[in-house]
Image (cartoon, grey):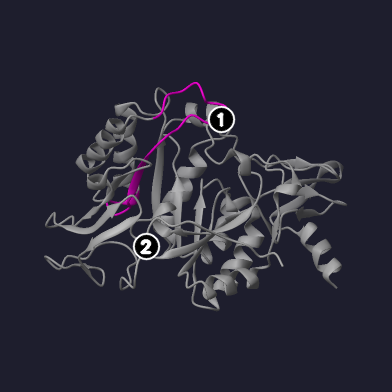
Amino acid sequence: MELEKEQEMDSHPARWWRMVEDNKILCELCPRACVLKDGDRGFCFVRANQGNKMVLTTYGKSTGFCVDPIEKKPLNHFLPGSSVLSFGTAGCNLGCQFCQNWSISKAREIELLSEKAGPEDIAQAAQRMACKSVAFTYNDPVIWAEYAIDTARACKQLDIKAVAVTAGYITPEARSEFYSVMDAANVDLKAFTEGFYKKLCLAHIQPVLDTLVWLKKETNVWFEITNLMIPTENDDEDETKRMCEWIVLNLGPNVPVHFTAFHPDFRMRDHQSTPPITLVKAREMAMAAGIKYAYTGNINHKATQSTYCHACGKLVIERDWYNIGKYDLKGNCCAHCGETIPGVFDKLDGVWGRKRMQVSFGE
């Protein structure tokens, strides 16, 4: 029985595909639209044509599980101070030359998938460890959507929230069901030019912008945006200004934006790390454009990582890296002036802080 279960996980039936000419499969999960003959794998590596049927080869298998602070996703307006059970698989549907998780997202070795756990196992583990949510992260959960969706549904049975950390590169055909079971998301808006996406991500920007607009207009998913700022590549002040103006115009002023620091990695080790002043200036430009909540990330800068009421300007959530200090919210309202703070808030029932705890599902 265990062998049958393992074999099923190795070739789990996938969705969002159709047969095209010459007995090939067209994958309709992401805008890359890979066409696969029998035996081929998609660009993401984890979706494959096996016997003229699409399968997900990483269902039930992970590169590892960790309990993290929710602020690390990053999400600053979704259950602050709480812990989240985080995991990912292998592969990715983008080809980012600067990937900060490249050992996972670019993995081609199945041996890296050392942890095996079904959706119910994950939900029960999160409940045992008092995690308020489970995050699909490290690599993009879009490419293992079936596994993420099933896990999110299992979590909902135990009143545990589901979080997607994603680049937002998904088709209209797939995104409705994927996000229907998500409570929150952090969407990585990698830059604000098509040239950057084509050159450094091997992708296109418009599907990402479409996902963001759709999330805002068609769903109740709480989402925040991350912009990793890479020196000389996407840190131009005019580009940042245009991006912030687009966000306000198309998504409104209440979507939090995180400007985070790049460190040399993968195929861009020749670039310098992002100077903190670049992130601080980007945050100032965002707020000048009308974004109410903008943050810096991957640097130690308490003032720009903390949350201030957009109405009275008073500190409502103090952050030192991922540690929560002063907390002046009453429900979802500023304790000083009573203004509603956009987000999903609960009573601060202890804080997880900066801890990172590995979790094993092995015997």
Residue 153: quarter of image: bottom right
Real-space Cα separation, disc 2 to disc 1, in angstroms:
30 Å
* Crowd rating for badge 2 (residues with CA inside 10 Å; few <14, some 14–19, many 20+): many
Quickly name the residue at label 2. Answer: 78
x%, y% of residue 332? 26, 69
**Quarter the N terminus occupies:** bottom right
Residue 283: quarter of image: top left
Q: Is residue 55 left or right of residue 179?
A: right
Identified at 40% across, 22% down, the residue is 232
Identified at 35% across, 63% down, the residue is 81
Q: Is residue 340 left or right of residue 115?
A: left
* Crowd rating for badge 1 (residues with CA inside 10 Å; few <14, some 14–19, many 20+): some
Q: Is residue 335 above or below residue 279?
A: below
The residue lying toward the viewer, choosing from 67 and 238, is 67
Residue 265, magenta (yes or no): yes
Disc 2 marks a residue whose amino acid type is Phe
x%, y% of residue 205? 49, 37
Would you say the magenta stretch is mainly helix, strand or loop? loop
Earlier-in-chain disc, 2 versus 1: 2
Would you say residue 297 is visible in this rendering?
Answer: yes
Q: Which residues are magenta?
A: 251-273
Callout 1 secondary element:
loop
Q: Is residue 337 above or below residue 300?
A: below
Quickly name the residue at label 1. Answer: 97
The residue lying toward the viewer, choosing from 138 and 34, is 138
Callout 2 secondary element:
loop
Identified at 64% across, 73% down, the residue is 120
Would you say residue 11 is visible in this rendering?
Answer: no
The residue lying toward the viewer, choosing from 60 and 301, is 301
Disc 1 marks a residue whose amino acid type is Gln
x%, y% of residue 353? 37, 59
x%, y% of residue 34? 71, 41
